[in-house]
């Protein structure tokens, strides 16, 4: 049984609570946001309270809080009130340290693009330019700002509509879609930790379309239910991929050496659950020709 530390957010100050907040919901993608102020001066800053929330209309949101340090609005927020447009970029590992330079709460008007030695490209639809070298760039227009409070730490949720998406050709698969294996972007974790999206940390999982595609727990052979070798995640992958010959599972004899068999099944998971099932059936003398 897992034991839990249970926390009441209201019992903590912002400084005490914030690490729990950013450490608990991970990984968070990073919106690296370019805006312009009313005088046309550039501003670039990262926000990991960020995601997309609607496909049609295509809406993204990120949340610059009221600054804990100054109690003021962040420049990105102020700029969007002056010029209601932005470009959101994902951050490639190659630019991680440059992104970090742009997080400093510098005085209004400081150009983080120059400070971090970044190159830009003109946008097609909006006025703020794009950061060159980023794999995904979204030109966007302000839709709505939802203030979640006016005290330090209170999020100012900025909803923007994506009006142009730019994808580096180097990240596209053969269908022209973004391939996560080629993106090499980073995401924010708790504290000062980040994670880099690398091919070896990815796995593939098709969504079941109806209950018949799933194997129920009761149908899972008993040795697998009790396995001390397979992890909960690996058992999950077996359940999620009902083999076409599932009906035959309950007629099988229990495996002679379940430990060795389960070790072998591990080698198929998570990428080839049907291969694992096939091996299981063969090992238990199943005829599934
Ligand atoms: C990876 C990363 C993610 C961040 N996410 C947020 C966030 O979601 N909200 C926020 O208010 N500040 C966030 N910050 C801090 C802002 O980047 C920082 O306050 C910045 O100076 C704001 O810039 P601006 O005043 O030019 O808008 C983050 C910093 C880093 C390094």
Image (cartoon, grey):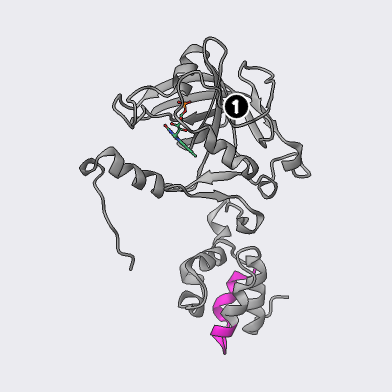
Helix, strand or loop at mark 1: helix
Residue 203 found in image quarter: bottom right
| Residue at x 39%, y 23% (from the top left corner) | 146
Residue 219 rendering spot, x and y as whole percentages: 50, 71
Q: Is residue 262 above or below residue 207?
A: below
Q: Residues in magenta?
A: 245-260
Residue 35: percent from left, percent from top: 55, 21
Q: Which is nearer the eye, 205 or 51? A: 51
Residue projecting furthest to the bottom: 256
Q: Say if 141 sits above or below 98 in the image.
A: above
| Point 58% across, 28% down: residue | 115
Q: Give the camera-side residue of 184 and 167.
A: 184
Position of the C terminus, as image quadrant, is bottom right
* Residue at the disc numbered 1: 113
Residue 190 vs 70, above or below: the answer is below
Residue 148 horizontal side relative to residue 64, left or right? left
Residue 228 % position (x, y)? 47, 78
Q: Residues within 10 Å of mark 1 (few under 14, many from 20)?
A: many
Whether residue 223 is visible: yes
Please state the horizontal and vertical placement of residue 12, each as a whole percent of the image.
24, 43
The residue shown at (57%, 12%) is 40
**Does 253 appear in magenta?**
yes
């Amino acid at each position: 049984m897992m034991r839990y530390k249970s926390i009441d957010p209201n019992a903590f100050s912002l400084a005490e609570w914030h690490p729990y907040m950013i450490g608990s919901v991970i990984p968070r993608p990073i919106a690296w946001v370019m805006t312009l102020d009313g005088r046309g001066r550039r501003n670039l800053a990262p926000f990991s309270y960020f995601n997309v929330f609607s496909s049609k209309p295509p809406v993204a949101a990120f949340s610059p809080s009221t600054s804990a340090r100054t109690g003021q609005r962040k420049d990105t927020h102020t700029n969007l009130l002056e010029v209601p447009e932005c470009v959101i970029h994902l951050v490639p590992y190659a630019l991680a340290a440059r992104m970090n330079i742009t997080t400093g709460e510098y005085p209004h008007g400081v150009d983080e693009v120059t400070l971090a030695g970044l190159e830009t490209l003109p946008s097609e639809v909006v006025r703020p330019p794009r950061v060159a070298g980023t794999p995904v760039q979204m030109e966007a227009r302000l839709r709505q700002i939802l203030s979640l409070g006016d005290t330090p730490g209170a999020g100012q949720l900025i909803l923007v509509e994506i009006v142009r998406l730019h994808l580096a050709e180097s990240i596209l698969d053969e269908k022209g879609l973004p391939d996560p294996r080629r993106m090499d972007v980073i995401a924010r974790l708790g504290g000062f930790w980040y994670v880099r999206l690398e091919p070896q940390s990815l796995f593939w999982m098709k969504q079941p379309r109806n209950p018949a595609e799933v194997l129920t727990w009761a149908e899972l052979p008993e040795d697998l239910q009790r396995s001390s070798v397979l992890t909960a995640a690996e058992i999950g992958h077996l359940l999620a991929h009902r083999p076409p010959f599932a009906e035959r599972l309950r007629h099988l004899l229990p495996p002679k050496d379940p430990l060795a068999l389960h070790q072998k099944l591990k080698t198929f998971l998570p990428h080839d659950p049907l291969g694992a099932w096939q091996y299981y059936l063969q090992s238990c003398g199943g005829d599934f020709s």
